[in-house]
Amino acid sequence: MRNMTVTEERATACPVDHGAARCPASGVNLWDFDLFQRQDHHAVLERLRETDPGIHWVDEGDRGSGYWAITRQAHLKEVNRRADVFSSGHSGTQMRDPDQRLNVSGFATNMTLIDMDPPRHTRYRKLVNRGFTPRMISLLEDYLQNRTDIILDNVVEKGRCDFVRDISAELPLQAIAEMMGIAIEDRAKVFDWTNAMVGGEDPEFVKSRDDILQAAAELFGYSHQLQTERRSTPSDDIVTTLLSADIDGQALTELEFDMFFLVLCVAGNETTRNSITRGMMAFFDFGDQWEKFVSDPDRYMETAVEEIVRWASPVMYFRRQALSDYEIDGVKITAGDKVLLWYVGANRDPRAFEDPWRFDIERTPNDHVGFGGGGPHYCLGASLARMEIRLMFREIARRMPDIHLDGRPDFLRSNFIGGVKRLPVAYTPSPSYDTVPLHRLGSAAGVSGTVGYGGHVERTAS
Ligand code: HEM
C-alpha cells in the first residue's frame, strides 16, 4: 500500500486509453452548481457512463486533486462494498478535499459515522443500530401516520399549496425530531439549521460560509444540551438508549453522540423530503403511473417506493479514497486517488435498469443504489425513509387524487443533495378530517415520550 496524501501530484490527463476518441471527462465540471440547479447534470453523467469503460478521471483544476467518476451501477456496488480498499475515513465523504473542506464542527474527518472506516465504524454502527431496530421503527408508525393526517388536513381545503414547504418537508423533520426527543418548540430551529448546512451553495439559504459554521455550531450545542438532560434524567426514548451502555458495556461518548445527532438531522431530513418531492414530480411526468397508483395504492406500494428512491436519488454522490491500488474493468485506480460514487448516475444505468428513463412503479427487479450500493455504510435510515414515503403517498393518493403541477419547480443549487426548494401544486379542495393529535387522545405520542407536535397544524376534534 502506498501512503499518499490527497495533495500529492498526479497526472491531470485521463490515464484511460480512449484511442483516437476524446476523453468524455475533458471539460467536465461537476463543481458547477448552476449545472445542477438547471438539472443538466444528468447529461454530463450520462456521457461519462456511456463512454467505455465507464470510469473516467475528472480533472478539478484549482478545486481539488481530481477524481475517478464512478457512474455505472455494477462499478459503484463494487467500490461501495470494498471498504477495505476505498476509505471513507481517509479524506471524508465530501467532494471538497479535506484541507480546504469546510469541516462543519472544526473536527477532523473520521468523526461521524459516515466518515469512518471499520473497525471503528463497526463498533459505532452497532451502538447506533439500537435506535433503528424494526421494533423502534414500527413504534414510530402510529405517530407518523397521525402526523401525515395532520399535514394533509392543513392543506386539503386550500386547493393549492407549496408541496415542499407544506407537505414533503414536514414528515421527515417530525420523524427525526420525535425519535430524538426534540422539543416541539425547537423543531423549526433544527429545520433551519439543517437547511443551512445542506443548502451550502445556495444563496437563498446561506449568505456566507460563516452561516454554515454557525448553523452547525448551534445544532451541535443543541445536541449537547439534549444529552446532558437525558443523562441526568433518563427517559424511555432513543436518546437514552443511545447514551446507555449495551450488553458489552459500550456506550457512545459525548462527542460521538453529538456527531451522530448532527449526521442524523442532515441525513434524515433532506433525503426523504426530496424523495417525496421528486417522487411526486415523477408522477406528474408519468400520469399513467399516477392513475395506476391511485387505483390501488397498496397493490403497487412496495415497488413504487423503490422506484421513487431510484428516480429521486437525493444523495447524488459520496466520496472515497483508494488506500491501495485496485483495478476495475481494466481501469487502474492508484492508492491515494479520490473516487466519487455518483449514485444519481448509476441509478440511470441501462445495464442495470431496463428503460432507465421510464418511471415504472412496478419495476422488478429494481436493484437501485439510492440507499448506497451495499457494504458497511448502507443507509441506516432506509426502513424509516421507506415508511415515510409509503405513509405520505398513500394519503396523497386518497385525499388529493387529482393533484397536479401548478407552476415551475425551483431546484436547490447543490451538487450533493438533489434538492427541490419549491413545487407549486393544485388539487380539488376537500374537507379536513380534523385529525386529533396523538397526545390529545391520551396515548404515548411516539417513542420519545414527547407530547407530540401541535403548533400551527393542531386541530380540535369536531
Ligand atoms: C430516501 C431517503 C434516504 C436516502 C436516499 C438515503 C441515502 C443514503 C446513502 C446513499 C447513504 C450512504 C450509503 C453508503 O455509503 O453505502 C446513506 C447513509 C446513511 N443514512 Fe441515509 N438516506 C435516506 C434516509 C435516511 C434517514 C431517514 C436516515 C435517518 C433517520 C438516514 C441516515 C443515514 C445514516 C446515519 C447514514 C450513514 C450510515 C453509515 O455510515 O454507516 N438516511 N443514506
Image (cartoon, rainbow, N blue to C red):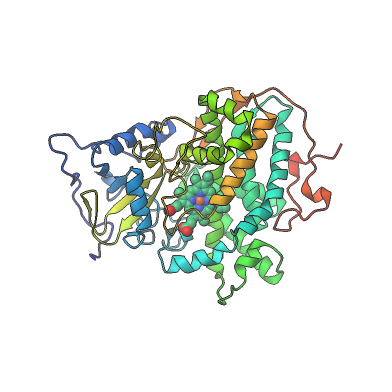
Q: How many marks?
A: 0
- In the rendered image, the residue lying farthest to the left is 20
Q: Position of residue 283 (x, y in %)?
A: 54, 29
Q: Position of residue 2 (x, y in %)?
A: 23, 64
Q: Position of residue 450 (x, y in %)?
A: 73, 56
Is residue 211 visible to us here?
no
In the displayed structure, 433 sits above or below 264; it is above
- In the rendered image, the residue lying farthest to the bottom is 249
Q: Give the residue drawn at x 35%, y 41%.
A: 31
Is residue 87 visible to us here?
yes
Q: Give the residue drawn at x 55%, y 35%.
A: 277
In the displayed structure, 166 sits above or below 96; it is above
Nearer the observer, 102 or 445: 445
In the displayed structure, 258 sits above or below 213; it is below
Quadrant assignment, res 134: bottom right
Figure quadrant of the C terminus: top right
Q: Image check: 447 left or right of 252?
A: right
Q: Position of residue 8 (x, y in %)?
A: 23, 57
Nearer the observer, 7 or 356: 356
Figure quadrant of the N terminus: bottom left
Nearer the observer, 113 or 364: 364
